[in-house]
Every structure is written in C-alpha cells, then in structure tokens.
Image (cartoon, rainbow, N blue to C red):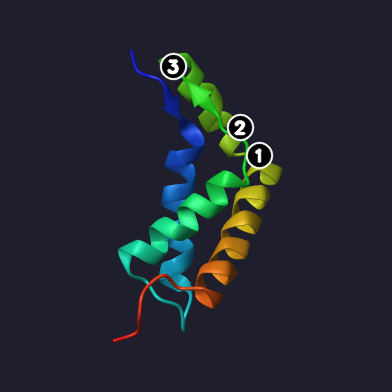
Amino acid sequence: MKLHNYMEIVVHKKVEEIIEKQEGICKCEKCKLDVTAIALNNLPPKYVVTYKGEVYAKINELKNQFETDIIREIVKAIKIVADNPRHNDE
C-alpha cells in the first residue's frame, strides 16, 4: 500500500486541461509544474492509502465546491507564473 496525495492527481489533470485552453501563456513543462506547485501549496492535501479512500476522494471530486476551489487556485497560479516566468523567452 502507498500513501497518495489525491489532490496532486486532480490538480495535475486540471492544470493540463486549463493551460491547453488558454492562449498567450507559456505551455512548457517548467511553467506547468510551477503552476501545479503554487496551486497545490494553496489547496488542502487529500491523502489516501486504501482503494476505499481513493473512491471516497473521487466522489468528493464531483462536488462543485471542490472543483471550483481547484480551478480558482490554478487560475491564480497561472497569473503568478505568467507574470514571473522562471525562464527566458527565446
């Protein structure tokens, strides 16, 4: 059995979805990881160990507030990274 932060899985997936739809922002792996890290630092972790815990976390994922909170933090993180990219445009 392994310990997983289910929030990480959800945020990674949502970051990919949201960034791909955005125009005018960098889509490089470094920027996507920066967005993911910033968003995760502002969201509560959802640790699961068992399959039952993962199922419970997936059910919670369907709740509107859960998704709204994640999207809000990702959008804020995208703005931060876009305003302060850690690489040069070449």
* Residue placed most toward the observer, 8 or 33: 33
Asked if the residue at tag 1 contacts the one at tag 2, i.e. Cβ–Cβ closer than 8 Å, the answer is: yes
Distance from the alpha carbon under mark 1 to that under mark 3: 21 Å
Distance from the alpha carbon under mark 3 to that under mark 2: 16 Å
Of mark 3 and mark 2, the one earlier in the sequence is 3
Q: Quadrant of the N terminus?
A: top left
Q: Which mark is residue 49?
A: 3
Q: Is residue 82 above or below residue 70?
A: below
Q: Quadrant of the C terminus?
A: bottom left
Determine the image quadrant of residue 74: bottom right
Please name which of the two marks, 3 or 2, marks the residue nearer to the observer.
3
Residue that sits furthest to the right in the current view? 65
Give the secondary structure at mark 1.
loop
Asked if the residue at tag 2 contacts the one at tag 3, i.e. Cβ–Cβ closer than 8 Å, the answer is: no
Task: Count neighbours of disc 1 (C-alpha within 10 A) and say few if under 14, some if 14 to 19, many if 20 or more.
Answer: few
Of mark 1 and mark 3, the one earlier in the sequence is 3
* Residue at horizontal 46 percent and vertical 23 percent from the top: 54
Determine the image quadrant of residue 66: top right
Q: Is residue 4 above or below residue 87?
A: above
Q: Amino acid at mark 3?
A: Val
Asked if the residue at tag 3 contacts the one at tag 1, i.e. Cβ–Cβ closer than 8 Å, the answer is: no
Residue that sits furthest to the bottom in the current view? 90
Label 1 belongs to which residue?
Answer: 63
**Looking at the picture, how far across and down is residue 67, in whole percent?**
62, 47
Residue 58 falls left or right of residue 64: left
Determine the image quadrant of residue 73: bottom right
Q: Amino acid at mark 1?
A: Lys
**Looking at the picture, how far across and down is residue 15, in whole percent?**
46, 57
Give the secondary structure at mark 2.
helix
Q: Which mark is residue 60?
A: 2
